[in-house]
Image (cartoon, rainbow, N blue to C red):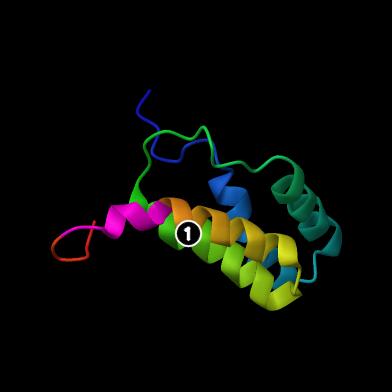
Amino acid sequence: PNDCWGGMGTTLVDSLSTLWLLNMTDEFNEGRDWVANELRFDNVGQVSVFETTIRILGGLLSAYDLSGEKIFLDKANDLGQRLLPAFDSPSGVP
């Protein structure tokens, strides 16, 4: 199918900062646990670099910034390393 999200829980990850800011602790913790136990990038396939960068990478980094939970930083680093080759072009733009 034509899925540019790659099954990465895009909406969940993108909404973590909102859950934190709204003090929805139970929901945030449930999302954190999903990220820690289920979110994987090793079998995703082709994705939109733009959407993945702003929604998944940005979501993970904002969740880390707000909560200080290292799992978000670890997942962001993993994803960032996987996205890096997309920027290996003459202009530096994917």
Residue at left 60%, top 71%? 62
Q: Tag count in the figure? A: 1
Report the residue marked by disc 1.
80
Q: Horizontal and vertical percent for residue 78?
A: 56, 54
Residue at disc 1, secondary structure: helix
Q: In the rendered view, does 84 fall on the left or right side of 61? A: left
Q: Horizontal and vertical percent for residue 86?
A: 30, 53
* Quadrant in the picture for the N terminus: top left
Residue at left 35%, top 28%? 2
Q: In the rendered view, does 67 fall on the left or right side of 52? A: right
Q: Main secondary structure of the magenta part?
A: helix
Q: Horizontal and vertical percent for residue 85?
A: 33, 53
Q: Label 1 is placed on what type of residue?
A: Gly
Please determine whether, in this image, residue 49 is positioned above or below residue 9.
below
- Say if residue 32 shows up in the picture: yes
- Is 84 inside the magenta-drawn segment? yes
Range of magenta residues: 83-89
Q: Nearer the viewer, residue 18 or 71?
A: 71
Q: Horizontal and vertical percent for residue 23?
A: 80, 71
Please determine whether, in this image, residue 84 is positioned above or below residue 34.
below
Q: In the rendered view, does 54 fall on the left or right side of 8? A: left
Residue at left 45%, top 41%? 5
- Is 47 inside the magenta-drawn segment? no
Residue 92 sits in quarter:
bottom left
- Say if residue 14 shows up in the picture: no
